[in-house]
Amino acid sequence: MNEKSLKKIIFIALLVSTSFSMGFTLSSFLNNKSSPVYHNVNGIDLGVFWETWGIIEDKYALGPLDHEKMIYGATNGMVNSLQDPYTVFLSPADKEAFDEDMEGEFEGIGAEVGIRDKFLTIIAPLKDSPAEKSGLLAGDKVLKIDETETIGMGLTEAVSLIRGDKGTEVILLIGRDGLDDLKEIIIIRDTIKTNTVEWRIIDNNIAYIQISQFRVDTTREFDNSINDIIIKEPKGMIIDLRNNPGGYVSTLNNMVSRFLDKGDVIFIEDFGNKTKEYKASGGKKFVDIPIVILINNGSASASEIFAGALQEKGIAKLVGETTFGKGLVQEVKELQDGSAVKVTVARWLTPSGVDINKSGIAPDIEVELSFDDYIDGKDPQLDRALELLY
């Protein structure tokens, strides 16, 4: 549904509310076939919706009606009919939670989730979060949240169930590739505070920089880090994008520009009837330094484009596992009551025009990090990256 249609629904709802104050009943308003609510959108008569509303208003006997909840439910159903897990309606509370995510502080378990092959799936547990500490892994399929089954559940509902106040408990029933049985994971919610960029010098003067998300403040954090790294004159660089669920296009554009020549294509947005190229703005910081990027199936969206751009330009080798494959771009459109629609507006394409949606980006060198490695504190992916830079 486009923004114009959504505004129309909300406007009609306001008309309905106004009709009560004028002394009219909703049923008489709806039964008036000359009413402005009876008109077509692409040949579909909106009167069917409003006739149903009127029947419920006149006949429903099991308690008072929550009209706001009905409007939100209808709008949510309309968005869900698109069968795109990334296009969602956000109530004012959901929108507030979304904004908190992108600001880097919220209460919950600290995991990015998505819908993959109709299953609620962990895209990435955040670093040092309750989700990570409990053993939750990228790719885990969440089959139950406490006692609620997730099959057919929308992403917004799932997030609202997983989230909660600091100190409270949530139990996730998960399925995992390589495990014969389902597994219950108990997680105690906490306040999640995240810095998106961390770095250090490791073996043989190699700069290791981990980017956990592409938020508004990530460019500043990244620039501060690389300015400090340059002073160290490292022999090579490892950029860790594992479990990075993505973020803002503008942040991605600024950060990739630190590695490319001005005018180099970073990625392409395919809107279906047109394409738009995003090009490096300049400010290249590194010349003739070998770079390895670590990826896994928790690397999604903007992190995939970051890795794909540097891979295709021959600037970096990719080590790890094939990325998640979220090649869709969303735009958040806020509505007049504080709710919002996050709508898919385009596809991400790599500089050469490769569509990564669902297929993801394959590493140049595939290295698995098993659950046993994780438990034992081993990191064969990082070890292989270091070997390439020695």
Image: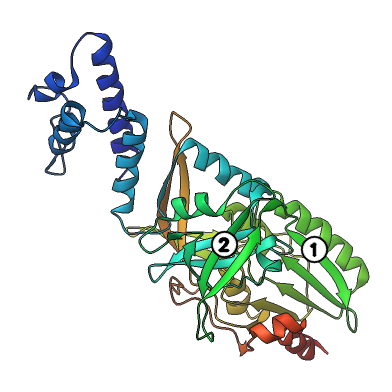
Looking at the picture, how far across and down is residue 264, in whole percent? 60, 67
Local crowd size for mark 2, using a 10 Å CA cut-off: few (<14), some (14–19), many (≥20): some
Camera sees residue 131: yes
User: What percent of the width, then of the height, locates residue 382?
Assistant: 75, 83
Query: Which residue in the structure is indicated by mark 2?
Result: 171
The residue drawn where x is 50% and y is 82% is: 181
**165 above or below 126?**
above
Residue on which the image places disc 1:
198
Q: Secondary structure at mark 2?
A: strand
- Of the 4 image quadrants, the one containing the N terminus is top left
Residue at far left of view: 33
- Outermost right residue: 232
Q: Residue at x 88, y 73 (%)?
A: 201
User: Which residue lies at the image location 79% right of the left edge and 78% below the top edge?
Assistant: 289
Q: CA distance from mark 2 to mark 1?
A: 30 Å
Between residue 271 and residue 135, name the one nearer to us. 135
- Is residue 319 or residue 380 the one in the foreground? 380
Which of the 4 image quarters holds residue 354?
bottom left
